[in-house]
Each structure stands twice: as C-alpha cells, then as structure tokens.
Amino acid sequence: MLKHLHLKKILFTVVFLVVGISSWAQGSESFSNLGSNSSAYSTRNWTGDGAIGWTANDARTDQTITGTAITLRTSTLTNTTTISGGIGTLSFDYKRSFSGNSTLRVYVNGVQYGGDVTVSSESVSNFSQEINVTGDVTIEIQNSVKRTTIDNISWTAGAPAGPTVTTGAVSDVEAEAAILNGSITGGDNTSVSFEYGTTTSYGSTEAGDPATLSDGSFSAIVILDVNTEYHYRAVGGTEVGNDVSFYTLANVPNAPTVSNITTTTLDLAIGAGDGNPTTTEYAIYDLISDTSVQADGTLGANASEAWNTAAEWSAITINGLTDNTTYNFYVKARNGSNVETDYDANGVEVTTLEDTSPSIQADALTAFGNVCINTTTSENSFTILGENLTSDDVIIGALSGYTYSTTASGTYTTTLTLTPVGGEILEDIYVRFTPVAVQSYNGNISITGGGLASPVTVAASGTGVNDAPTVTTSAATAITTTTATLGGNVTAEGCATVTTRGVVIGTSTSPTIGGLGVTDYAAASGGSGSYTVSATGLTSNTEYYIRAYATSSAGTTYGNEETFTTLCGDFTLPFTEDFEAVTFPPTCWTTFIGTNGLGTIDNWQRITSDTYDGSAGTAYVAFEDVSGGNAEDWLVTPPVALPNTDGTIELKFQEAQDFDASYGTEYYVRIATNNPTDPASYTDIITYGESDLPSLETGTYAERTIDLTAYEGQTVYIAFVMIQNNGDSWSIDNVSITETAPPLATPVATAATDISTTGFTANWNSVDDATSYRLDVSTEANFGTGTGLSELIISEYVEGGDPLTGNNRAIELYNGTGSSIDLSNYSIARNNETQYSLSGTLADGATYVIANSGADSSTLALADLTISFGESTAMSFTGDENVNLYKNFVLIDQVGNAPTGSGTTNVTLRRKSTITAPSSSYTSSEWDTYSINNIDDLGSHTAAGGFTPSYVTGYEDLNVGNVTSYEVTGLTAGTNYYYRVRAVSDTETTANSNDITVTTGVENVWNGTAWTGGSAPTNIDAAIIEGEYNTADDGEFTASSIIINTGGSIVIASGNNLTVTNGVVNNEAASSFIIENNANLIQVNNASNTGDIQVEKDSSPLYRLDYSLWSSPVAGQNLLAFSPQTLTNRFYNYDEGTDLYTAIAPGSNNFQPGNGYLIRMPNNHVDFVDEGTPGQTWTGTFEGVPNNGTITVAMETALNGYNLVGNPYPSPINISDFYVANTGTIGAGSALYFWRKRNNPGSTTYATITNAAYTANSAAGGDTGSGTFTGDSGTWVINPGQGFFVEATGGSLEFNNTMRRGVNNGQFFRMQQPEQQSSRIWLNLTAEGKFSQTAIVYNSNMTLGIDYGWDGKALVGNDPVALYSTAANTSLAIQARPSFTTTDEVPLGFYVEEAGTYTISLDHVDGLFTAGQDIYLIDHVTAQLIDLNDVDYSFTTASGTINDRFTVVYDQAFLGNDTPELNPNQVVVYQAENGININAGTLDITAVTIYDMRGRTLYSNNNVNATATTISNLQSAQQVLIVNIATSRGTVTKKVVY
C-alpha cells in the first residue's frame, strides 16, 4: 500500500523497433459475374472476384449502384468459398430499392458486427466496420422485410497476431494515488504502459515498470484526484488490455458545524475544506445515543443510516430530538464505490434547548393480544408523567373496548379525568380490555388537556375473538354387534365453557348433529378433557363414521373422523340378500359341504348368467358326480333375529333348476338357532324335489314362501341345502325374511276438552304405526239414519265363454256400510291360493270392479282393476272354483261352488238386494243367475233399505294428520255432538273408534240480577253480560268466553279473579269492563280479544320525584295518557346499546307489549317530607285491549345484554315458569331486577329476585318485597303492570298463558307459606346513606357453578356500594349453592365508590339457619374471625372493587393460627377534612414519610405507634404526594392528592 506518498516520476523512453512491415492482402466483390439482369426473385449462385464463390436466396439482379449489383428481399448473401488469412475492415455500398424500409445485419464467422442497420433511403450509403479476425472467414449479409441493393463489397486483410495484454486489478488505492497493474504474454521485449483517465477515452499515459517486457507483469504509480472514478487499460506495443475502472478514496471529513438549535431540531452542515468533490456522500453519527441520522432527519438504527452530499445535508433538518439533551455528532464520507472513511476526529457537541411548554410523556401499553369476546382482561398499565401543565384537566380519552382506572382494583370507566397538581401529573393508568365483537380493537388512546398543544397517544392493541373449542376423536373400543364405546378429548375450550360434548355417528362420512341418519351421543357433562359415551342400537357388520364434538356459545367444533365396523351379529328384519355384490358368500353368510366330505369341486358360488330377472348375480350350486354317497352343499344365512310379532314372519326367495329332466336331486330349507356350522343343529322346514322347481330350459324363476312365525322371538340361521349325485343344480335369489305387521289397533276416543258454545277439542289415544287419523263429527248418534250393510261384499260374479273369450271374467265388490272403506285391508284369491292385495279407498254406496286382463273390451271398460295370470290366479277362476274375499287375511265372503261347479258354471251371478252381510261360504239362495258374459249391471248394485250418513259439514272422514287431538269449530250452542276416529297407516285404515258424546256450552246471560242458565256459567259456557256485574257482590265465575253487550258492565273487584278459557269481547266502552287493583283476568287459550277494558294498578307509596317501572297489561295504551301529569321529559325507555335510560316522547308512543318503561310520578303528587313520613300510592289506569296469548320481545345484546321488559298480562305471572320458558334467552346468571327506590342517588336502585331469593333495596320507599318473597320460590309471581330487567343472551323473550296465575297479593306475592326447601342468609353492606344486600342460598338441587334461574348477578358499579358473593368468576347478588355443610366457604366481594368505614351485618336468615347455625366472616386483611350472629363488623377500606378480603364460613376453625403476611389493602390512605388520613386496621403504624413527585420530603414521623393517624396542615400545593407507611409487618407505599 502507498502511505504518505512522495513520488518521483521515472520517465521511460519507449523505442519501437520496426523489424519489418507485412503487405496485408485485401479482397472484394463487384458482382460483375452475376450474369444477365433479372427482376425475378430466386436463389443466385456465382463465382465472383478472386474466384470466391457466393450465393444469395430470394434475390434479383436488375438493380445497380456503380454497375451490376445484387438486390436482396428476405434473404441472405454469403460467400461459399472460405476467405483465408482473416480480414481487417469490411465495407460495402447499399441503398433502398422500391418502397418500404428494410433491416440489414452483418455477421462474420457468426458474430454480428455493426448492429441492426435500417435501410430507409434510396441514396447510396456505405457500411464499414473494423472486424480484425484471423483465419478462415465467412461473411453473411442478411436483409429482412423489404428490398435492399448491395454493391462493392471489400475487405482488408487481417493484421498479424500480436502479444496478449491483460489489465490487472488496481492496488494500493489512496485518495490521490493508486498502483495500476497489467501483464503481457507473447511479447518480444515489447514496450508496456498504461492509458488512464476519467472516461474510456483515457487521455493520460504512464510507462510501465519495467518499461519493456516479453512475458510477465508490470505496474505504474499514478497521481490522481480525490474520490474520482478512473478507467485504465494495459498497453503492450499496439495491443491493449481490457478496461478496468475504480474510485479513489474520499478524504476524512472535517468536523460538522451546527446552527438553528431548538428544543427538538437543529441544522447540521458538513465541515468545509476537506478536499472532497461535491458529489461525495456523508453520513452523520451521534456518539451519545449510538444512532445515526436517517433519511427523514430523525435518529435511528446505524444499519439504516442516510448518505447525502454536503449540499443535500444542508437542506435536511435533524428532528425528533429530546429537549435539554446533549448530542455529539461525527461525520464520515464514502467514495463512489461506497468505501467509507473514518469519522472525523473531533465531532461537534450540541445541547438542545429546554422545552418549557406543557408536556406529557407516556409509557407504552403492553398489547392485550387475542381476548375472548364479552370477557374482561386483567389490567395492563402505562405511566404518564406531565410537566409544565396548565390547570386544565388531563383527559384520558375513550377508545372502544377499553376502560381505565387509576388503581388496579378500582372502578374502570371509558374515560378518565386527571387534575394536574402544581403543573405536574405522575399517574399509573390501568387499562382493561373488554371486546364485544370478533374484530380488531387496535387504536390510540388519546391524552388531551393540561395545555397540551396536541394530543399524546398511547397505542392500544387487542383483538376480540370467539374461539370455538378444540376436540379430537378417540378410536372406538369395546365394539360388539350392536354397541361400542366412543369418546373424544376436548383439548381446549376456546372462549366459552363447553356446555355439551359428545360423539355423532352415522353410516356416511362427516356426520353432524341433526344430520340425516346421524345419532348424537352426548356426554354426561360439558367441560374439557377426555370423555366416553356408549353407543347402542347399532347395526351389526356395519361401517360407522364417528366424530367427537364440543359445543359452546362460540359454536360447535368437530374432531377428526374415525371409522369402525360392528361385529357380525344378529340381523334384524327386514332381512334381504340379492347377491348383487361381487363378494361371495355375502357378508356374514357361510358355505360348507356335508359331513361326508363329498363334492369338493362344485360348491355354492355366485353366477352372473341365467340370473333372476337379469340381475347382476344369483347364488348357484351345480351338480357334481361323486363316489361313495351324495354331495351335500350348504348355504347358510347370518343370524337373523325374528321379533315377537302379532303378525306373520315369512321367508321368500326366487329359485330355479337347470334341466327339465329329473335326476333325483333333493332340496332342503333348514333352520337352526345355534351352532350354524353343525348340520346336526338344523331342522327341516321344507323339503322338495326337482318336480317342484321350474327349470331354466323351459321356464323362469318361481318364488317360494315359507312361514317362519313359529320361530318368533328367536335368532335363527336359514340353510339352503342341495343333496345329489350327478343330479341337477339350484339357483336362488332375492332372499328375504320380513314381518307382516298386524293390523293397526283401533284408536280409543277420549273425552272432549276445551268445550265452548261453538266448539270443542276432540281427543283420542295414539295408535302405534299410525301415520294419520280420520275424524267424523255428527249430530246423529249413529252418524246417519237408516240401516246399512255390515261389511264389504262380493256383489257380482261374471264368467266368460263362447262367443267371447274364456278370460271374460270379473268380480264386483260393493260398499254399503255407510262409511268409506280402505281397500288395503282386503284381498282376493282363487280357492286358497296366494291372495292378491287390493288398494285404494271405496266410498259408501260405490262398487269396485276387478277384471281379468284378458277380458272383453266392454268388460275392461267397466273395470277399476285388471289382474293378469302372471300377477295372480285370483281372476283366472272357473265355475267349479271359489273366489274368496279376505279382510286382514281372514275369509269374509265367497262365491263359487267348488268342486262341483253346480249352478256356478258358465253364468253371471248377482247378489240379491236383500243381502246385508258377507258370507264365508257360498249360498246359492243369495244370488240371482244370468247368462254367461252378461255385464248389463256390472259396475252398479242396489241394496234394499239403506243407510244415509249424516255429518257436520267439513267433518266427514276429515284427515287431521298425525295428531291425537283436533279442534272442532263452527258448532251450535247447547247441542249434542258425537265424534269418532280411525287410525290410518301406509297400508290400512282401522275400524271406527268408540263414539264420544259432547254437549256444547250454552250462552248464559247476566241480566243484571240473575243468570238465564239458573246459575253461574261454567268453563264451557259463554258468559254474556247485559247488566251490571261486580264480582264483589255477584261472585267470581269461569267461562269459555265473556261478551259485554249493550247495557252490560263488569267489575273484577280487588282480591277477585275471573278465568276465561277463550276470548273476551267488550261491545261497550272501556269503562264497562274494569279490573281493579289486586284483581286479575286469567285467560287459558291463545284467543283474540275484542274491545278496550280498563286495568287499575296501584304504585308503591312514593313521592313526586320518584320513579316506577311500568308495563302495560293492555294493547294501545298511550304513555302520556297513562300518566298525563308527569312531565313529558320524564318518560324513559332503556337503550341496551348504551346501558342508559333514554327519554321517549310520551305523546307519540304507546306501551309495547312485554316492554318496560321508567316513568316519574305525576308532577302534582305529594312532595317528599322526611324519612319518617311515608309517600302516597298513585293509581294508574291502563285502557286498551287486554293482552293475551304468547308475546315475544326481541332481546338486544350489543353491550351488556340488560333489557327492560314487563308483565304484559292483566294477571300475575309465575317467576319459575318465566325462567323455564326462557331458558337459553335469559343469561345463566341473570336475576330479575326491579326498581325499588326513591329518587335518591345515594341509595341502592334495584331489588333482585331469582328462584333462590330476594335481595332488598333498603332505601326509603324502596323495599316492598322482603316480607313477601319467602317460602317456596315456585309460587312467587310478578304482578300486572310491573316492569323489570333481565340480562339476555339474545333471541326473543317469551311470555305465555301458562305463566299466568290467579294470585291477589297487592304489590308482591303473599300467601300461606309451604314447607321450606332452601336455607338462606342475607347480608348487608352499609355506610351513611348507602346500602347493599346479598343472599347466599343452600338447596340440594343446586351446584357450585352458575345455576340458571337461581343465581343472580350483582350490578356492580351501578350504585355507590355493592356487596356480593362470587362463583365461577361471577359476582352474584344471589348465589345458590348445593346442600349446606359446615365446611363450606363462600368468597365475599364488595365495591365502594369512596374510601371510608363500612359495616357488614347479618340481615335475616331462614331454613336451617334459624336453629342457631354459626355464621362467621373472615377478614383476611386483619386476620379476624367475626361471629355475625353476635356483632356487626365495621372496617375501613380504600375505594374500588375488592374480591379477596372476606369469606363467609360456618366453623371458627377456618381462621387458623398462621401469622398472615402484610396485605397492602389493609392500609388505607385518603384525604378528608384538610388532612391525610391513614388507617392500618389492626396493624401498628411505626413511621410515616411523605414525598412530592420530585422526591422532596414534606413530612416525616418515625414515632407514630398507632393503628391510625391523621397528618393535618401539611404545607403543600395541590399535587400528587407519595405516602410511605412503615408498619409492624412491613412497609406500604400509597399515592394521594393533597
């Protein structure tokens, strides 16, 4: 390397010795030998100048330049004789011929020279290019697109080969010098040097060292400019090397200079005079922060430092600096090759100005990540430090999904307001994240106020997720023919508790809950971890697909799919096998040969030819020639379970043999109940020979039917056994074992219900296998008049013959029973042969003609059914054979005189009109005889006398569907009606049921003094009121309906009830139907009401400014009309999306059924006097159509799910029934919340009720239920007009008539108390003017989780104080727990809005606690055990929510003897009455020290020695102070504003 370069130029004289000069040959082509001129384009070949051959394709010769020339189109001109000795320069003349431009390309030895040449001018141009190649040469001139003329090609000879010169890499590069390097081979003491400069034109030369050289390396030292790009190449004689370029180094910069310094910015200039060119780039580094200036002027990572020229840096302001901070900037440079210098030696030190404007610094907030929706995270926090602030409050702004508090366990709100003290703030801000939707909640928390010029932001990030559970499917175990043990593993519950888990199973892939053919086996409980279920009722030898699943509120997740196959067990009916599958024997079938072992070659197999009905396969066994006995081939079914049956079980199969001739083969069908592979286990069912089988030579398959009913209730194996020796074969197919069900049972009609004046509900018992029912209703006891036939009969018999076809046969059936007949119960047959089943329905008085399919066309025209011989022999009768009619396979009628045919051959027979019943044997006297082929009367029949049906219009054979009750309407009052039903299946209709008599109710009119019916109406009568009626004087009654006509009125007096099965109609004014306070109208059915009524409802004793929650029991009641003296801005509904009451315009809005409204008392109501003076009751009157039937109210869940609803009926509703009807809609831990207070913001607002308990609101005027909600909670009710809150999970809330009760208890339910089933304690939390109550309930039916309808959430933060117990991470105002044990522990939490002293006390108890059971309160902070039966407990606490301080126990052994550790919550610090109050409970305070935010000591006392102390008259401006308290158990630090 060159260091401190001092150079002397050594000059070398290069002497060129000219040894000799060669004569370089040259060549040319003048095209003079082209031959004749021609304008045709063709391939041209010629020998040109110097005997060099040439060729050109697609060329013409009629154009000239200086003489003959060649014109190319899309073609190539090239020499065909090699040019030897190389060439130097190649040149030729060219021009455009004709129109259009062309492109020329010149190649020498395949290398293009001169680039693409565009030929655009008709003037002559010259191409000349230095080639300098040696050896043999081939020239190619290519032309494309248009035409180019070429002439006068010439070239110089190639130069002789010189030495090879190579330029080496530069070395020892400095800012102003470098060493150039090169080498030469093949020289002859050749002069060497370097050409160099700032371009490839070079311009400067430096002799090499050594100056002459034949072979080897040489170099030269050159003096250069700073940071400049240079090119150089080595030179040897006339030869040159390749070009090499490089940059000289840049000079180390001078120290930078700084100007324009502010609190956060400054300008920095590169130091002048460093000798670098203006293109030099510089980078700037701060030594103190170990960062570099970035492209935008900020400080950042050194890896991303910015490089700019000095001029560019002068335009960039360094920014983002911290006020009153020292920086030390250094500069480095780099050359054009990015080679960097060292930093300058001195740098420049600069301090930014101090910022005295208001400022706030905030730490970063840790990201919350993915959080399940509707849950609240534990807190993250950031600290803010504010200085130079104004007196304006500092606001922590709202950001959706986030709430803030200044203490970890304090009250969290959507915004925070902080007041600077002495211009300063130092505060930890605790943040909780509560997502309510599946989305990102990324954003910035804005901090404003305090004089800040712009908001300070803290990035908050979190994402609401609703992760579904994760579950895996276990492999099936303990697999049997019909059962298996299945299971799964809930590996993660996701965002919600898994409420249901189990396994779904089906015979298709991907089974899902509710899927077609899918069975759901739910596990015994939800939750996570492994579980198993027992699958039963499976089908043997069946492949099943299973998937475990887990369900939570986030949805249902399925695990991986597993498969298993049940064992080959009993097959159930119907059992079928058609041998279509390729595998043989079929699944679970077996084949074997007899015990003699003969016939091993031809056994049972599956064939695909000569199959039954052309099917894909048939079971077949061929004959076999054996010696020593007979071959015996067995084909055995799987085990088939035959059910116990009232019907029949039949084995059927198609069979055939191969040959007509008889070869002595024996066929057996055998049966066994065990040991299916042992022939000795079998019993013959049937045996037959070849004559009993059709042969495939002349016929086809025949069906064989075998009755297996004798084996009902057993599992059997059926064996098909062929025994032969060189006999025949046996083919069988379509094997089936089926049960023919017994006939449907006749339904039993039961007494009618819901009887009214115009209708009733008909009822009957269900019939197994029925798919629907037919209903008849009549005013006639016999459902008609007259006498009819008892059953379906054969009414005509037609036999055919000459001159017509012998197949001209027909049978006529006649229905004269008075009712339609389901023909599917009937069948016909010739003699005792196979019966042919009929179908369809035959109306009363109609005939049904059945004809042979080969009958004469005139007969066929009258037929309702035709039967061919191939289908059945039933219509192939002759006169000496019987035709039988069967009902449910029992013979009921017959025609034909078999076997003699006397009187029944070649005749037509018609049944006499006097015959009224069928006969199971033929009697000639019942028939009239006519000639053969006579069909004059076919299709009609006359019966003497007759029966005329009579039905209520619309109720004759009415299809009412598959139900067991049906409402009959449109009837006449006071009339006897009769009804009956028939059961219907897919194949039959039963006989009529028994008849039920119903008498409709009467219209019982009240004329003002008496009932026209002689006594009060019953629940089937219409009560028509046409005079004044008051239940207080005239009594209560029930009715099917109530109608108020002209002149009529009714008052349901206080304490009375009226029950109406159906609707209420008021044809008079609303004032004609009054329901007084504490009276009820109860309706049973979902009937419509007509006309307005008035419902009176008393409020609790209240004052003018007090509020009540109201709900209307009538439709159409306007809000303002209900309470016209209430100020119009004091009517509210509830916005669930904000959890706030919102004003509603009362004049333009009505009460909506099932909704609640908050309404202030009338403005002329009595004013508040004092706590000892009770308020007054106000009577509200609702006017409108009384609500009835099912009423639904859509629930909103956008925020917390609290919805304001109300009792929509003019009668109480049962709380327990209300909970049951709304399972899945009301939240698991929701109570019913009732407004119970005066208008006093310091008092608890809501009373709470569940099935478990009622917790009071003891604010004056607030508690009206403590003495009422006692005893059995199953009888508690919500009275008419009452509004209340529920916490919903979505869907719609339902009110229905089954909830309604006839209870008269005033404001709340009160009645004689039944046996107590729960044991309860009530605890109060009180302070001056503040109250909260919680209940703990023990009941054997409850759990330690959240019990729907029994546990009730506490409304924490809604009021100044809240006391609650906790379970399943939920704060509960009412907690139901399992049966009481003295070892139970109940965590107790509380919320207080302000620090101070509070008291927990036992309010009252019931159940087992009335016997003196101990009740203790553990204070974990003070380590005290308090007997609440003896004393109330007062304690001091900081504000906020505290869940770990108290536990309720029932045995004093729970406290223990361990010395507790210091709990910071035990020490309370708060400012009051111009002093700082410190209370350490039972701990001794040894010392107190108070500091301000800058660490200065404002107060110190090392000799306190007390459990509480107050520091007064502290000299401090309003600011945040740090209080350090030393106690006997340790030191606690608290913050307080003073």
Image (cartoon, rainbow, N blue to C red):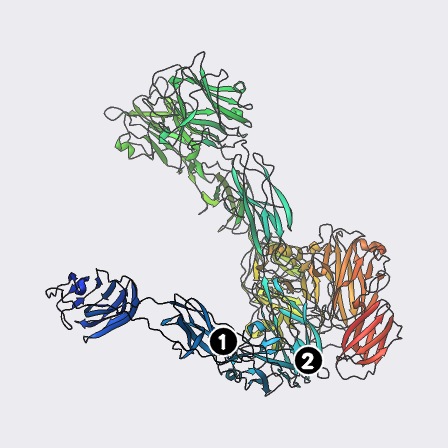
Contact check, label 1 and label 2, Cβ < 8 Å:
no
Which of the numbered marks, if any, corresponds to residue 871? Answer: none
Residue 81 location (% of width, % of height): 21, 60
Front in this rendered view, residue 651 or 231: 231
Q: What residue type is disc 1 on?
A: Ala
Residue 1154 location (% of width, % of height): 59, 63
Label 2, residues with CA under 10 Å away: few <14, some 14-19, many ≥20: many
State left or right for residue 426 relative to residue 1060. right
In front: mark 1 or mark 2? 1
Front in this rendered view, residue 774 or 510: 510
State left or right for residue 160 relative to residue 1240. left
- Where residue 1520 sits, quadrant-wise, is bottom right
Q: Quadrant of the C terminus?
A: bottom right
What residue is shown with label 1? 178
Is residue 1037 among the parts visible in the rendering?
no
State left or right for residue 287 relative to residue 813. right
What residue is shown with label 2? 386
Residue that protrudes farthest toward the bottom in the picture: 260
Q: Quadrant of the N terminus?
A: bottom right
Residue 1170 location (% of width, % of height): 77, 76
Q: What residue type is disc 2 on?
A: Gly
Q: Secondary structure under badge 2?
A: strand
Is residue 83 among the parts visible in the rendering?
yes
Residue 930 location (% of width, % of height): 29, 25
Label 1, residues with CA under 10 Å away: few <14, some 14-19, many ≥20: many
Q: Mark 1 vs mark 2: which is more N-terminal?
A: 1
Q: CA distance from mark 1 to mark 2?
A: 60 Å
Q: Secondary structure under badge 1?
A: strand
